[in-house]
Image (cartoon, rainbow, N blue to C red):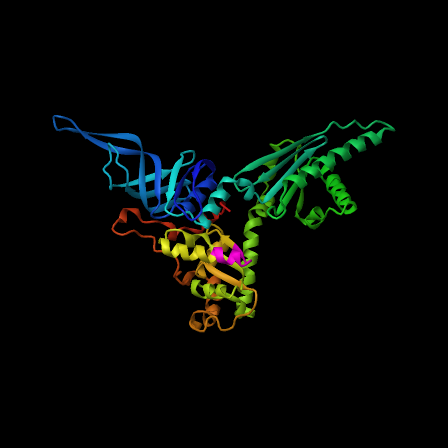
Amino acid sequence: MRLIKKNIDRGSSGELKLEPEEQEDMWHAYNLIAMGDSLRASTVRKVVQTTDTGSSTTTKKRMTLTIEVVAVDYDSVACALRVKGRTIEENEFVKKGSYHTLDLELHNAFTLQKHEWDSIALDRVEMACNPAHQADVAAVVMHEGLANLCLITEHLTIHRQKIEHTIPRKRKGLCAQHDKGMEKFFDAIIFAIIKHINFQIVKAVILASPGFIKDQFYQYMLNKATREDERHLLENRNKFILLHSSNGFKHALTEILQDPLVLNRLSDTKAAEEMKLLDQFMHLLNDEPEKAYYGLEVVEKANQSQAIEYLLITDELFRNIDFNKRRRYVQLVDSIKENGGAVRLFSSMHASGERLGQLTGIAAILRFPMPDLDLADDHHHHHHHHEIQNNLNNDDDLQPNPNRPDNSLDNTNDYQSTNNDRTLRENRAEASAW
């Protein structure tokens, strides 16, 4: 996502102009644009003009319209957003107050204005505009004397550094110069890895080369890290994946990334973390239910005692809801962070986010047991969780999610959001975005 103009402060009104550049950006836009926001974009609208003789002609005109958002619909297949609303600025062709649907597409900039930019919205902008934050896989492709280091997001490869070294050829009795050259070359790669790879974000590092260079490099790196006590590399040694590539040029990455084994490993990096956390929650719900709670009221109560270690919450809860309800979620998230708890925003595009959605979309793992938390709604929690366990394994009879907004609009049946009847196939197809 390209940030063209920014005029916003946290907690106050303001606007920004964004241009979606990648498919992933449409997903970010879908999570940013909310009911009640003002959205300005270029659009095509049919205009009826009547001549003096009374005959009328209909033409399509491109124009820029500003609407107050009433509904947002995300089309994963076309990778587009349809945003419906009432026009709020006078236009020579369109009456103020009439309905219009803006179709947002890639490379078509839009301006978004909110009455209040909260931390969730600002984090989303930061995430969308700084792809390095999402790149949880890194790759170094190399052959003798050349290496390229890249960061990889679901849809994007960010080239970070090219490393070139002239390495003397091996000659009879003169191997030492060749080996020295290789060591210098490897040192430069290690330096680049330390400089560019943030191991708190990156879950896997691909090392690829023809022949055995990748293996020699990996061994050299571990030996050097052991000698120099480079903890960073030693602690993350299991994140390295060694693969074959035809050369060390950037384009060799493309072939590697098409390997189904690699694809599985990569698509699972971020999602796997979420799954792990959700599994931990489900186990606690069974074994130590006083430390695992779900549902907004109970989680808010736990937070009043600063008891929350992890909050699990789906991005779906922040979409299509009224301002006050959103503010309640945002205050909860901000407060948990201030109290030193960790907040994980799950994407409803991933299976883990769907599972969490079935548990009201909000769950907490506590630092210490709080047995009396749910006395008021005991029926909701413990007697219910076996049922939930069964339901999670059997999708046919899921509880309707009380926090999930009803997506239909008042009186405008032509624009029903199809979000709730998405097929599993579509969900899988789009499990990108995170």
In the shown orientation, is residue 283 left or right of residue 39? Answer: right
Quarter of image, res 185: top right
Q: Nearer the viewer, residue 247 or 199?
A: 199
Give the residue at the far left of this rendering: 53
Q: In this view of the protein, can residue 30 be seen by the observer? A: yes
Any magenta on residue 335? yes
Q: Position of residue 178 (x, y in %)?
A: 80, 30
Q: Nearer the viewer, residue 264 or 23?
A: 23
Above/below status of 192 relative to 319: above
Q: Nearer the viewer, residue 81 or 323?
A: 323
In the shown orientation, is residue 65 left or right of residue 191? Answer: left
Q: In this view of the protein, can residue 207 be seen by the observer? A: no
Q: Position of residue 149 (x, y in %)?
A: 64, 36
Q: Residue at x 39, y 42 (%)?
A: 14
Q: Position of residue 86 (x, y in %)?
A: 28, 43
Magenta segment:
333-343
